[in-house]
Image: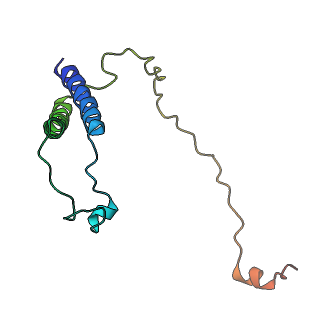
Amino acid sequence: MLGILLNSLYVVVCLLLVVVVLMQQGKGGDIAAAFGGSGSQTAFGARAGATVLTRATTVLGILFMVGAMALAIVGQRSTGSVLSGVDGPGLPTAAPATAPVEIPAPETPVEAPAETTEDAAEAPAEPQ
């Protein structure tokens, strides 16, 4: 319940912040004003008094940052999963494991013909 309330309040603050920033008028701080153009006396233009929109921007900016931290803290404390409480198809039941079967050894061992070093030296090389 608290998470839903914080999320909805945070979305409202974000939307208000966007609207307030877009409603503000430009202060003439373009690149020409930074180099003394267009009658500017300072690098950033003359400072005007704080209007309602600049105060609202400051307050909403602070609420934006505090809300982000609050949502991060609430999100860390949550231990639930997105899929908690959802009945899924489940895992298929595995067949029971069988005991290993011993393979009897052959009664007469098959011996490979042993090659001596003399036989290997006498054998002609195969053509390539």
Residue 88 location, x and y as percent? Answer: 42, 17
- Report the label total: 0
Quarter location, residue 52 = top left
* Residue in the foreground of this view, choosing between 62 and 23: 23
Q: Quadrant of the C terminus?
A: bottom right
Does residue 9 lie above or below 57 as drawn? above
Residue at (24, 26) in percent of width and height? 12
- Give how far across and how far down residue 39 sits, in percent: 26, 62
User: In the picture, residue 40 is in which quadrant?
Assistant: bottom left
Closer to the camera in the image, 39 or 16:
39
Residue 105: x and y in percent read 58, 45
Q: Quadrant of residue 84?
A: top left
Q: Residue at x 22, y 20 (%)?
A: 4
Image quarter hosting the N terminus: top left
For the rendered model, the colour scheme is: rainbow
Towards the viewer: 6 or 104 = 6
Outermost right residue: 127
- Residue at coordinates 16% horizontally, 21% vertically from top-left? 2
Q: Residue 96: x and y, percent?
A: 46, 23
